Image: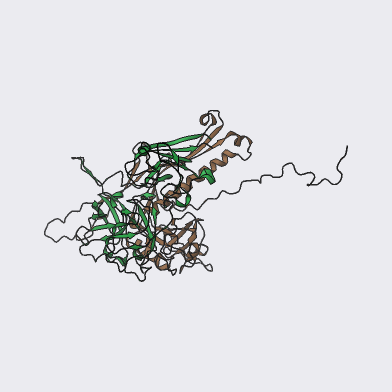
Amino acid sequence: MSFQTGITNINNMAPELPVQASEDLLSTPMFNLIHSFGVDLHHAEAYIGKTTRMSRFERLSTDGGQLDGSGIDPASEVPVRTDIDATMEIYAKSIVTNEQVVLWENSKTLTKFTALLGQWLREKEDLLMRDLFSSSVSYINATGGLNGDQPSNISLNDVNNIERLLLGNDARTMLVSIDAMNKFSTGPTRDAFIALANTNLTRDLQTVQNVLLKANYPSQEGLRPEEYCSISRFRFFVSSKGAKTPGISTLGNTIYTIPMYGLEAAAKIEQNNYTAIIGYRPPWVVSSVAQNSQLYAKFAIARAITNQNWISGLNVTTFQPS
Amino acid sequence: MPFTILTGGTFLSDGTAKKINLPSSADYFRTWNLTQIAQTNPNKVVMAEWFGPKFGAGASPSNDGLRWVKTNTLLQIDVFSNSTASDGFIYVTSTPVVEPQSANAITLITQAAGAVVSQTNTYSEGDILQFYGTTGMPQISGMTFEISTVTGSGYTLIGLDSSGFSATATAGFTRRISKALAVEPQFLYITGISQAVQAVVTTSVDPTAYYVVGMKIHFSIPAGFGMTQMDQLTGTILSLDATTYTMTVDIDSSAFTAFAFPVPISTTLTGSALFATLAPAGASTTRDPNTYVETGYNFQFQPFRTGQFVPYLLLGAGAQSPAGADGDQINWMAYKLEN
């Protein structure tokens, strides 16, 4: 009987398991959720229809009003109520898993899948709010940029124009000012409206006149990671899912939409007891031979622009075509 | 491969493209033209099939699909090649965007009330098109318009009075987009506002598809359009007209300066590059408790809601297409593979 001689090494004695799992999974990519936190949150009760009404009384006229001493009463005014309605809608997602995956997989598959569904809940909600902003608001084309396109890239003049519109309509800022501090290269931020932009615009945002990048705020306390900079009276938040429409500028480039708004401009309505439901259906329910189980997530949401006077925004292109 | 029949239905073709909402992603879709299948030698599509992305290299190219043509008393297959694919199946999975269709060049837009566009096209009556790069007529570059009186070589824009423009458009592009945006009611482009006690507003699309009497609308009128007094006002719709694409509102514009498109500074740039638009601003609902008459409310139009259900299949129309020609009875069925 012959035998091999020499040193036993990894060439003649390969490891039994050539791979091993690291201590944890890598991160699942998640985009910045920027489209919900600046809106009002309302709640809808069950059993009374799927449409939620939000009402506002318009202010009374300030014309006239002086009594002339004749004893004749001034004309009375009928108050005007404006109703904003929104329809509740339900969205759902499920993952059906075969028992063999669970049986022979060692990464706690169902737990991981549950986490994925939880992430889907928040991401889907964010995109639904983005779609509201991009569909039901009037936007102004940027004109102050120098890229020669229509609309142009963003400029300070364009941002200031939106501030003028919002202030002219008595919109209220949403974020409080950050006081100046004795730190090099920092400057105070004024109380501000919110602006939501696609991450493709960050290169242009950095070059807008008087931009204050987030790192140059006097304090970083309480800032959201999605925030990018402050320009004029707006603080910009960015997401890779910010609204855009490819190929429709005058030069055939992508147009990006930047919603810019103050308090009570938009609303998200949640259905009570239906905001985030995650459930499990066991194999004996899902499959006739009890081999497939199902995880599901669902939520109900309604959305509305509640005051068009307090929301506007810009259509822009990028300085370098995108 | 086991499969589930997701859903099915039937419709009477009106000669225009048909949108079929799907309750989930689909892997296979089939139509039957019951009208033509009963004919002798119709030489028209009697059955069409679409294979979804799951089929990989075997998936149907966008705007195509397998089409079975009956050329005598038998069924014979006639598959359109990719190079001539048109008016087939288009599978749309996201909004707000375009029914995937490549840009289409235009050769002329006339200066007229009801501008006429020259363009070789396969569009249908009532399609909504996004215009851009309109050389000579930059005022409308980026706007959307509803088209009518459609032929293979052109169509009319009821919502555009370009008679006051300084030049015709000699080039440009269009893309077809969804009639509904991701959320409704949607903002609309304004192409005209009259000076009247009750202002008449012209929009680029038929406003009756999106708004009803009693709804409030908020105006955004950039300075370049002249009628600056209208900017940021909110009015209530008093009437709508589907033939002229107009709506009458309770705003007295008789003393306002005239509305006009900005004058271009070049053949490709307007200088102001802005659009006049209107957006939904609620309604003032009233209900007479004596007569039970309710005004200013319409569940179909007023509430903010999803405008464009996805995913959906857009079926092209015509004798050689899955949605058939005017008057054809079409059955359809959507399938989902279980693995």
Camera sees residue B196: yes
Residue A321 in percent (x, y) is at 48, 64
Give the quarter of the image for residue A141: bottom left
For the point 39% across and 67% down, which residue is it? Answer: A143
* Residue projecting furthest to the right: A1
Q: In the rendered image of this protein, which colour is used for chain A?
A: brown
* Viewer-proximal residue among B171 and A320: B171
The chain displayed green equals B
B281 in relation to A44, above or below = below
* Viewer-proximal residue among B253 and B264: B264
* Residue projecting furthest to the bottom: B265
Rendered-image quadrant of the N terminus of chain A: top right
* Viewer-proximal residue among A40 and B53: B53
A316 in relation to B330, above or below = below
- Specify whether B85 is left or right of A28: left
- Specify whether B224 is left or right of B336: left
Residue B174 in percent (x, y) is at 39, 58
Residue A56 in percent (x, y) is at 30, 50
* Viewer-proximal residue among A69 and A125: A125
Residue A39 in percent (x, y) is at 40, 52
